[in-house]
Image: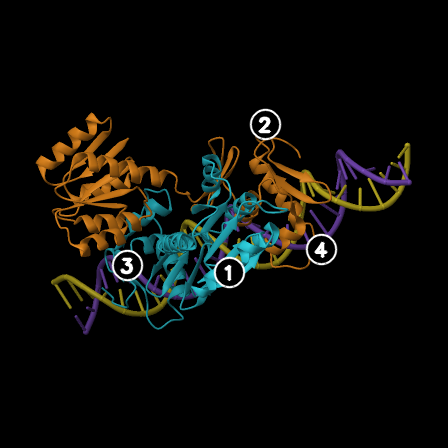
Chain colours: A orange, B cyan, C purple, D yellow
Amino acid sequence: MDVLIVEDDALLGKALQKGLEEAGCSCVWVTDGKRGLDEALAQNADVVVLDLMLPEVSGLEVLRRLRRQGVHTPVLVLSALSEVDERVHGLQAGADDYLVKPFAFPELMARLNVITRRSQQQTTPTLSVGPLSLELSSRTAEREGRRIDLTPTEFRLLEYLVRNAGDVVTRRMLCEHLWDADWEGVTNVIEVHINRLRSKIDRDFDMPLLHTVRGRGYVIRGDGAGR
Amino acid sequence: MDVLIVEDDALLGKALQKGLEEAGCSCVWVTDGKRGLDEALAQNADVVVLDLMLPEVSGLEVLRRLRRQGVHTPVLVLSALSEVDERVHGLQAGADDYLVKPFAFPELMARLNVITRRSQQQTTPTLSVGPLSLELSSRTAEREGRRIDLTPTEFRLLEYLVRNAGDVVTRRMLCEHLWDADWEGVTNVIEVHINRLRSKIDRDFDMPLLHTVRGRGYVIRGDGAGR
DNA sequence: CCGTTAGATTACAATTCCGTAACGTGTCGT
DNA sequence: ACGACACGTTACGGAATTGTAATCTAACGG
């Protein structure tokens, strides 16, 4: 496990690094907020240990900026203050846990384990079916490592299919959810978009995921099974 | 608080409804999975109490489909089985808590309170600065109740500005994050897009949010303050 | 006060995206 | 085997999106 330590006190920093490395973690230790933010933004750490009292940029500020940038790496905040107020601020700013100095090293380890486990099982904003995954935040798809660019409607179509993976999605459903519409069947918009989608997510691969169910609609399935 | 109860056992269902209503909650009680899913999808409930053993569509299936549709309403699962296995399945399918029958009513209440509170403070996938908010999932913006349609690049530009709200965003930063690019300054793409963005989020309102900092770049601020 | 410069605004052209229509292909029932 | 029908494929035109360039406006320095 990779840990980023942001701690200006050399004694404590060194102790943390030593203890964590003995516990089998690899550490990066920086001593000011500026570099702490940079390292954290690089997203190479699985968890961050962040002191609140720092020169230059305060720990709270680092935390706030980190979260604003959309980085959700779990953060454990250290502070000399035991004030409830501070604790509230920290948690509001996006900390996952809080530890008051002085503390016992085993407790730090225990808390780090808890928050990393929790963050791992958090639902990431991503959908997937078998080898295909959609990243909702960036609106891109990926299959077997390859990035797939989708137009807005292609993405919405695929998203809807994936949310109903394994179930047949009827034309009617698509009309109502992707267009506004009651018309349904006036044109062949759907077939056209299904076709374009297939050419992107299935054409270049062995196993087709998007199947048509004659007379009913379409299904997307993770295994290759046609029905 | 609005509670949706999905429970086929009439005795238990009635008891739950009575108890919850006495505690000041308003309840909707349905007795099968199909209607449970429909009601839950309507998103009128703040929390769902879901029995696992149901006729037609099983509780697990209801839960799974609900989550696949992107609905995050907290769900408390009820089950006669105390098997660890079942519990794991339930939690994996997206349950927020688990209660084994028979149970004491106060415990149910306590757990409902915990999971609703937790879900409320969960970070919704939305950014906001003052009167402006961005919904990341649907890629739309809203200001003072009015929906604002943004093109893909406009949205990315605004998102980046909002994530750095209060800080000046330089041209260099924009070039690197929104385009790939090292060119920076060859053309005036940025000014043009800023202009288009302003015409949508500021033009029709009293207080401008997007300010230019001469020689540095742009800031977005929730209060009207120019600097 | 004037020239310089940064930024705003507008116009325009290239590209992309989307819905329609026409046509091709395969499947099913008889 | 044949026709009907469902779906696939391709081509085309209009609309939206995006980057470039030209022009206009406002701030700043001296």
Camera-side residue: B129 or A102?
A102
Q: Do the residues under discs 4 and 1 have CB atoms within 8 angstroms? A: no
Confirm whether residue A43 shows in the render. Answer: no
Q: Residue A218 appears at what percent x and percent y?
A: 65, 42
Q: Type of residue at label 2?
A: Asp
Query: Mark 2 = which residue?
Result: A206
Q: Do the residues under discs 2 and 3 have CB atoms within 8 angstroms? A: no
Instruction: Give the secondary structure at mark 3.
Output: strand
Instruction: Give the secondary structure at mark 2.
Output: loop
Q: Cα distance, mark 4 to mark 1?
A: 47 Å
Q: Do the residues under discs 2 and 4 have CB atoms within 8 angstroms? A: no
Residue A120 falls in image quadrant: top left
Image mark for residue A186:
4
Q: Residue B47 appears at what percent x and percent y?
A: 46, 56
Image mark for residue B17:
1
Q: Residue A136 appears at what percent x and percent y?
A: 46, 46
State which chain disc 2 sits on: A
Q: Cα distance, mark 3 to mark 4?
A: 48 Å
Residue located at (20% from left, 33% from top): A28
Q: Do the residues under discs 2 and 1 have CB atoms within 8 angstroms? A: no
Establish if A192 lies above or below B194. Answer: above
